[in-house]
Image: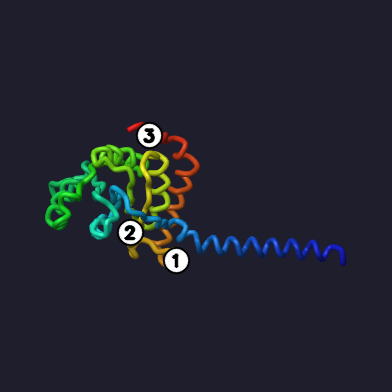
């Protein structure tokens, strides 16, 4: 019996350590989704999302702070509301609100249904802007996946990302609210899907 106690102690310690690891990973899984490595770049790109207004105002602020020479907002041309597409409404809104930055703020028209498809369409807009480095603005929970996708598909640009926070949809302590839980679970599903499957389906774009 005395010879078995050390083995039992080791097993118990391993189980306890595994539980601690799982608990820490559980709590930190929301923070892992959020990435912020912003650097000054040639262009700032606001990725497509359900709530673009906060990202737009943040983009203007970063533009004034010298984080980019041009601000591009991804806006859909195939969604019509009250007689105007998202891209059309965004263009008119920018004209009214961008002020002295109006000549440096543009819409990047897209029809993509996935972030990977969006990245390929953004490439056309970046070519026209002659950018070599890009700062992405994305919903905070989407920043890690956005940076991974854009960096993989468009490797000729230098990428960084900054999070746009929206407390209604997500928070790092994701288990505290029902909507945050839903957002975290869905985003983790998308991240795993990208890293295990879509990363190998979508080939990087080469050339200029």
Q: Secondary structure at mark 3?
A: loop
Left or right of 156 on screen, residue 63: left
Percent x, y of residue 92: 13, 51
In this rendering, would 2 be left or right of 88? right
Residue bearing mark 3: 205
State the residue at coordinates (37%, 47%): 159
Residue at the spot 27% in from the left edge and 38% down from the top edge: 127
Residue count near mark 2 (Cα–Cα under 10 Å), binned few <14, some 14–19, many ≥20: many
Count residues near mark 3 (Cα–Cα under 10 Å), then give few for <14, some for 14-19, many for 20+: few
Q: Residue at x 38, y 32 (%)?
A: 206
| Residue 104 disc label | none
Percent position (x, y) of residue 150?
38, 44
Residue to which mark 1 is pinned: 173
95 or 24, which is in the foreground? 95
N-terminal-most mark, 3 or 2:
2
* Mark 3 touches mark 2? (CB < 8 Å): no
């Amino acid at each position: 019996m005395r010879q078995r106690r050390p083995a039992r102690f080791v097993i118990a310690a391993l189980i306890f350590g595994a539980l601690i690891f799982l608990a820490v990973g559980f709590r930190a899984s929301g923070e892992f989704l959020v990435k912020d490595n912003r650097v000054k770049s040639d262009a700032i790109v606001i990725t497509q999302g359900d709530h673009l207004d906060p990202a737009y105002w943040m983009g203007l602020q970063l533009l004034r702070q010298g984080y980019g020479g041009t601000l591009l907002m991804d806006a859909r041309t195939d969604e019509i509301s009250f007689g105007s597409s998202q891209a059309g409404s965004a263009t008119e809104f920018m004209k009214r609100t961008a002020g002295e930055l109006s000549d440096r703020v543009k819409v990047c028209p897209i029809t993509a249904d996935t972030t990977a498809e969006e990245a390929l369409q953004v490439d056309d807009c970046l070519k026209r802007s002659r950018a070599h480095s890009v700062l992405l603005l994305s919903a905070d929970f989407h920043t890690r996946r956005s940076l991974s996708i854009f960096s993989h598909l468009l490797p000729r640009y230098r990428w960084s990302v900054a999070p746009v926070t929206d407390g209604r949809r997500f928070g790092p302590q994701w288990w505290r609210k029902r909507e945050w839980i839903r957002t975290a679970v869905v985003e983790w599903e998308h991240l795993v899907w990208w890293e295990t499957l879509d990363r190998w389906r979508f080939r990087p774009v080469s050339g200029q």
